[in-house]
Amino acid sequence: METETIKHTGGDWELVEASNTLGDFFIRSSEAPGGIAVLVRGLGKEEEEANARLLLAAPEMLDSLHDLVEWANGFDGAAGKSEPPWIQKAREILKKIEAGK
């Protein structure tokens, strides 16, 4: 399976704590200084921050999934072994992410 990188907002993403009417945290980058995402209030500050940090890591996780699948592609069918479930899961996640193409 060949994977394609989706177009998402580039630049280094950063988490900003900003108490405003929408939420306590937002994510921005050098390419989107006005913001990429706002974590809406209602879950409690600790949970909102945890969710924000998860979103903040999304570009790196996406790159890692692509690297993992590319690496696994070099071993497809090697020695008659089936693909491990964690590689299959990585492929499924990439399909879900890139379904909008």
Image (cartoon, rainbow, N blue to C red):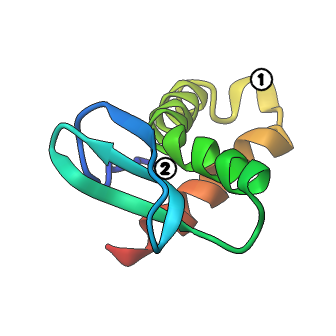
Q: Which residue in the structure is indicated by mark 2?
A: 1
Q: Nearer the viewer, residue 75 or 87?
A: 87
In which quadrant is the C terminus drawn?
bottom left
Q: Is residue 7 visible?
A: no
- Residue in view at x 77 percent, y 48 percent: 46
The percent position of residue 13, horizontal first and vertical second, equals 36, 37
Rendered location of residue 61, percent (x, y): 55, 37
Q: Which mark is residue 56?
A: none
Q: Which disc number belongs to residue 79?
A: 1
Report the amino acid beneath label 2. Answer: Met
In the rendered image, the vertical position of residue 89 relative to residue 37, given as above or below: above
Q: Residues within 10 Å of mark 1 (few under 14, many from 20)?
A: few
Q: Name which residue lies at 62% across and 57% down.
A: 93
Amino acid carrying mark 1 in the image: Ala
Residue 69 shown left or right of residue 29 in the figure: right
Quick one: label 1 or label 2, which is nearer the N terminus?
Answer: 2
- Residue depicted at x 23% and y 35%: 11
Left or right: residue 100 compared with residue 82 = left
Q: Nearer the viewer, residue 58 or 37?
A: 37
The residue under the point 26% across, 41% down is 29
The secondary structure type at the circle numbered 2 is: loop
Can you give x and y, in whole percent of width and height, for residue 30 in the image?
18, 37
- Residue 98 lies, with reference to residue 78, above or below; the image says below
